Image (cartoon, rainbow, N blue to C red):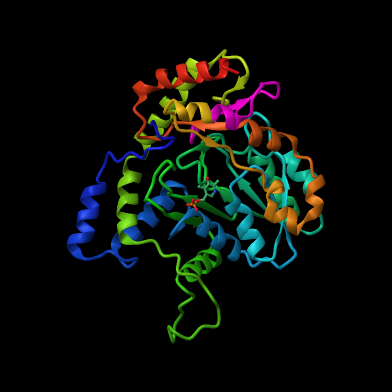
């Protein structure tokens, strides 16, 4: 089986881990944690980084730091991971899911403007799969309307928008270091920001809201979301190699596109827009509306042939949890998100993929598509 993702460790990961074990600094108190935060924040052109246990926790802390009020509306893309909506819901905020561009899979300013109401207080910008959101018009709109912008750059480590780093936009940005992201700490995440209040809120929120003068007396509740020194050691080493990792990701994307261009019945990722080059977090394929099978059937046949796949995200507005809570979402029509969710899947494109296997994978994809 060629797995849909394999991580890649080509730097000092083992050396730094050994250092943690030998010195006994394994908890969140070790020096790699501070080093990873400073180096990662610097890499994203942010003042501060707060490392956490995963990207979902990072989203939670980012939202908590903005002190929004229950009932406030947050515009977010429907086509994204559930973590984006769950942190909004848990704070009593109202998620307002919007559609995406059918080619980039990203929300656009038009979608945001159409969803804006008097109750809108924040926009969650999520860059999907490989291309960043065209973020300037959204930042401009947010400024005019005095809205917070939270940026989910989990899939965009090292990606640039008009030459500026993803993770540097808006009030607060979040990352994940899950094993399939551009750098990994196994599990892990980071919140990055420039604002001191947001920074302090995230520091407190991840550390059980311990505060002086009496550590175990609380006027606020937090979480234990602390990253360990072991994870941070891997993160520091991974970040040292990020330029190479991005080159590899782009090579994989280009290799697939070269071999799959012209194949009937499918859409491939957009390589380039006027604001960014695709970073190919995953290599995604979307079946045309007229294709005679569903993505799940194509995936099943590929899996039988030993090729790992993953379905696309399922839209937030069609999640059973939210349909139960907001029955009127049943009549929402977000056709682009629905189309790609139903017809999209991605193929082996992790950093550890042996690239010499790409021609074989593409041949199998073509054979499977022809079989319907
Ligand atoms: C991976 C991912 C997350 C969640 O990160 P975890 O570390 O898995 O919790 C959040 N948002 C996006 C866009 C992601 O791709």
Q: Does residue 13 show up magenta in the picture?
A: no
Task: Say which residue appears at 46% left-offset and 16% top-offset.
Answer: 363
Position above or below: 363 against 245: above
Q: Looking at the picture, tell me which residue is in the foreground, 63 or 282.
A: 282
Q: Looking at the picture, tell me which residue is in the foreground, 305 or 128.
A: 305
- Residue 225: % across, % down: 45, 65
Q: Quadrant of the C terminus?
A: top right
What type of secondary structure mainly makes up the magenta span?
loop
Question: In this view of the protein, can residue 278 be seen by the observer?
Answer: no
Residue 226 sits in quarter? bottom left
- Residue 184: % across, % down: 38, 47
- Residue 6: % across, % down: 37, 38
Q: Quadrant of the N terminus?
A: top left
Task: Say which residue appears at 53% left-offset and 30% top-offset.
Answer: 299
Residue 32 sits in quarter? bottom left
Task: Say which residue appears at 50% left-offset and 20% top-offset.
Answer: 365
Task: Say which residue appears at 49% left-offset and 70% top-offset.
Answer: 223
Q: Does residue 275 show up magenta in the picture?
A: yes
The reply, left or right, for residue 52 in relation to residue 81 is left
The reply, left or right, for residue 132 in relation to residue 157 is right
The reply, left or right, for residue 262 in relation to residue 251 is right
Q: Report the label total.
A: 0
Residue extent of the magenta highlight: 272-299
Position above or below: 217 against 346: below
Most distant residue in the left direction: 22
């Amino acid at each position: 089986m060629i797995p849909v993702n394999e991580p890649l460790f080509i730097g000092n990961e083992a050396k730094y881990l050994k250092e943690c074990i030998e010195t006994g600094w394994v908890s969140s108190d070790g020096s790699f944690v501070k080093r990873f935060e400073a180096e990662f924040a610097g890499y994203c052109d942010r003042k501060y980084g707060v490392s956490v246990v995963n990207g979902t926790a990072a989203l939670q802390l980012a939202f908590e730091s903005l002190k929004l009020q229950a009932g406030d509306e947050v515009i977010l893309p429907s086509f994204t991971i559930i973590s984006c909506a769950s942190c909004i819901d848990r704070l009593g905020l109202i998620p307002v899911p919007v559609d995406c561009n059918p080619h980039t899979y990203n929300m656009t300013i038009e979608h945001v403007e159409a969803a804006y109401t008097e109750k809108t207080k924040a926009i969650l910008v999520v860059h999907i799969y490989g291309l960043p959101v065209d973020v300037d018009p959204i930042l401009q709109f947010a400024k005019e309307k005095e809205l917070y912008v939270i940026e989910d750059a989990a899939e965009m480590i090292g990606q640039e928008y008009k030459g500026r780093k993803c993770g540097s936009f808006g009030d607060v940005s979040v990352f994940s270091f899950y094993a399939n992201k551009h750098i990994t700490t196994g599990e892990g995440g980071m919140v990055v920001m420039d604002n001191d209040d947001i920074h302090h809120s995230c520091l407190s929120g991840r550390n059980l809201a311990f505060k002086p003068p009496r550590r175990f007396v609380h006027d606020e509740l937090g979480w234990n979301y602390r990253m360990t020194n072991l994870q941070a050691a891997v993160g520091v080493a991974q970040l040292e190699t990020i330029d190479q990792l991005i080159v590899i990701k782009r090579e994989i994307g280009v290799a697939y596109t070269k071999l799959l261009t012209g194949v009937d019945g499918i859409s491939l990722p957009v390589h380039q827009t006027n604001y960014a080059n695709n970073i190919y977090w995953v290599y995604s394929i979307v079946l045309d509306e007229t294709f005679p099978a569903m993505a799940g059937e194509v995936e099943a046949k590929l899996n039988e042939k030993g090729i790992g796949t993953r379905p696309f995200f399922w839209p937030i507005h069609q999640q059973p949890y939210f349909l139960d809570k907001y029955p009127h979402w049943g009549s929402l029509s977000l056709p682009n998100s629905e189309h790609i969710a139903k017809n999209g899947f991605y193929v082996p494109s992790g950093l550890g993929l042996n690239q010499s296997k790409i021609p074989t994978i593409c041949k199998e994809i073509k054979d499977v598509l022809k079989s319907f």
